[in-house]
Amino acid sequence: MKFGNLYQSKKSRARLGRIHTPHGIIETPNFVPVGTNACVKSLDSQILEHLGVQLMFCNTYHLMLQPGSKVVQEAGGLHKFMNRGMPIITDSGGFQVFSLAYGSVASELKSQGTKKTDGSVLKITEDGVLFRSYRDGAKIFLTAESSIQAQKELGADIMISFDELPPYHMKQQDLSKSLDRTHRWEKRSLDEHLRNTNNQALYAVVHGGVDVELRKKSCAYLGDLPFDGFGIGGSLGKNRPEMLQMLQEVMPFVPKERPNHLLGIGDLTSIDACIPLGVDTFDSAFPTRAARHGSILMPGNQHFNITRGIYAKHFRPLVDDCRCYTCQNHTAAYIHHLFKAHELTALSLTSIHNLHIMIQIMAQYRQQIADGTI
Amino acid sequence: MKFGNLYQSKKSRARLGRIHTPHGIIETPNFVPVGTNACVKSLDSQILEHLGVQLMFCNTYHLMLQPGSKVVQEAGGLHKFMNRGMPIITDSGGFQVFSLAYGSVASELKSQGTKKTDGSVLKITEDGVLFRSYRDGAKIFLTAESSIQAQKELGADIMISFDELPPYHMKQQDLSKSLDRTHRWEKRSLDEHLRNTNNQALYAVVHGGVDVELRKKSCAYLGDLPFDGFGIGGSLGKNRPEMLQMLQEVMPFVPKERPNHLLGIGDLTSIDACIPLGVDTFDSAFPTRAARHGSILMPGNQHFNITRGIYAKHFRPLVDDCRCYTCQNHTAAYIHHLFKAHELTALSLTSIHNLHIMIQIMAQYRQQIADGTI
């Protein structure tokens, strides 16, 4: 993997880059749709490539359990398994495992909800995490080494180091200990990767929770190691303003000569605020999940719900002048009808549209950086 | 509409034909996928056209309730509403209405199951059927005239006359009375159609249940009227052998110079047996419903279930040498995985494959008739 920083804005930390991978180039800033099970829901790889999705995010945890990373390896890796010719990134599996321990990680990272465990995580030790498969009840021991091994079997262009996801509600002292252990796990991930380097790249994950000093310490420690890029993970605050405040303080310490990725954040409001802070890539299931609930994206961070009655006779595209397959071929009235009639086709058509809009919006951000307006 | 009988087999009643419609030609014998809600489940019109689906079946009953035939009319008719450039056929709505009265019509026609009513059908009179919408509880009175009016609003290439679906368990005397009323309803359908002929065609439906003499009487009565074609409807027996026996006796009395359509039957075994009896077109939801349950069609009336464990590592297409989009782009192992991971994409990919196989099989039947082997 190679990263080229093409242009650094003079008005903000925003920057234009290119990540060169074995399966092609990712222009940054960019949005990365999540295809948990080696599939962006309701679409297939050919549609994604046609849309111009330059990087796709797959979840190692889910793929370890189904079909199993060894099956994907036998298929010739994720690209061949799902017939994708463009870049793929996999996570470490840690996020999902710890979400079993803490309930919804998304809620927990924002300090919402209550701590709960369904008993799936059996033990967390210095070595790793012992958990129970939700599919067949089998005990699985996930470590830095086994995560990297699984990710090598999956064969994505970019892998992510194994980390601990500490809950938001953690005392500073425990958070510091957790960070140290995460650093040891990440170093072990790197060592495991370097034992058998191939064409894959490995990102570290910057942690430190809501403690700015710990975050800076994490940037310094990980930045000294030969990782190919940096994820920003863990709890960044209770809400978006807190997250932005934290990123404002931390982004200057994330190594500039390598790409960075904000893990699990990809709503339009956050993207809009994070690009000037220097974030390169964002992953989220948001645009496709929204699509499946009838929420239609429009240029300019607008959206509307196609299931509303006012669209029953809207015999025009979802978005006028939109050049996506859906808007070129179908009307809002027809898609409204498909939702009312509970037709699965509605979910594919709206997912195509929303991803097209996301891709278009990201291209516009890149243009604005080039134009010097961000 | 114009029908050209291109070739009559010398070995059987099988024949080659061409139905010329305002939206193109339907080669017969042919299979007609059902898209109840103006949508073949999990696909869209562009995919159907690309597959070469020459005729698509839509259900007037469902479309009357959602989005309403007037909305479709405002859209410019079904073709524009769903962006389909090729021929469409709609039914009268009667089948679904009577299925509310008798439980599952499919079961009832075969004399399976028990008679039941959910109270949706409120009254059946000489004039028509009063029923309650399952969507909003509104009372709807469906008559020969209102069915044809709705079908004219929908604007399909081929419409079907309004008929009564008598249950299998009907005394001969009642069946005869039902047939007479169905004939009056069909005549009224024709009169309503002729009041305002347009580019649409109208099929009659031959009835008479499991009584051969009533079936012949129906052929004679309807054949004397200027219908454009003939559906064969109602109960044809308890099982496939009874149905084939009945068709063997009745098909010689169905007018030959006009096309015929076997309503609601489209499994491969029935098609194989009915083509030599002279049936032109078949509609069924079978190949797409089978696909959604993981049942994969193969040439030669074979099938297998992709969810079986033996396909987990089958890194080849569903069917070797199959030229469908799915087999050209994806492996059986990947589709197996998508089913195991409950990904909707699985349903689209298998539906595409099964329809491709149906279309290929029908083309082969036409070739065999032309070759003189059927």
Image (cartoon, coloured by chain):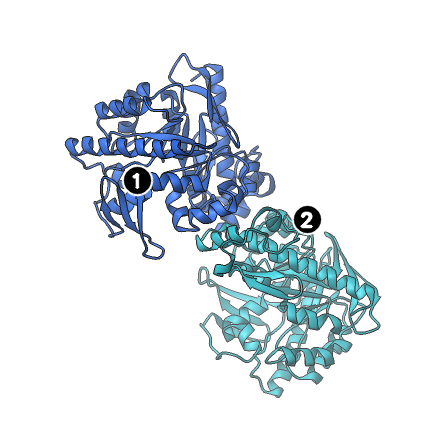
Chain colours: A cyan, B blue
Which residue is tagged 1? B106
Mark 2, secondary structure of its residue: loop
Q: Tag 1: residue type?
A: Ala
Image position of B146 with respect to A182: above or below: above
Q: Tag 2: residue type?
A: Gly
Image position of A228 with respect to A321: above or below: below
Q: Taking the image as drawn, is residue A152 in sight?
A: no
Alpha carbon separation for disc pair 1 and 2? 46 Å
Q: Quadrant of residue B257?
A: top left
At 42% across and 29% down in the image, what residue appears?
Answer: B281
Numbered label attached to residue A354:
none
Q: Quadrant of residue A210?
A: bottom right
Which one is in front in this view, the residue at disc 1 or the one at disc 2?
Answer: 1
The x, y position of residue A310, in whole percent, is: 50, 59
Numbered label attached to residue A85:
2
The x, y position of residue B99, in whole percent, is: 29, 44
Q: Taking the image as drawn, is residue B276 in sight?
A: yes
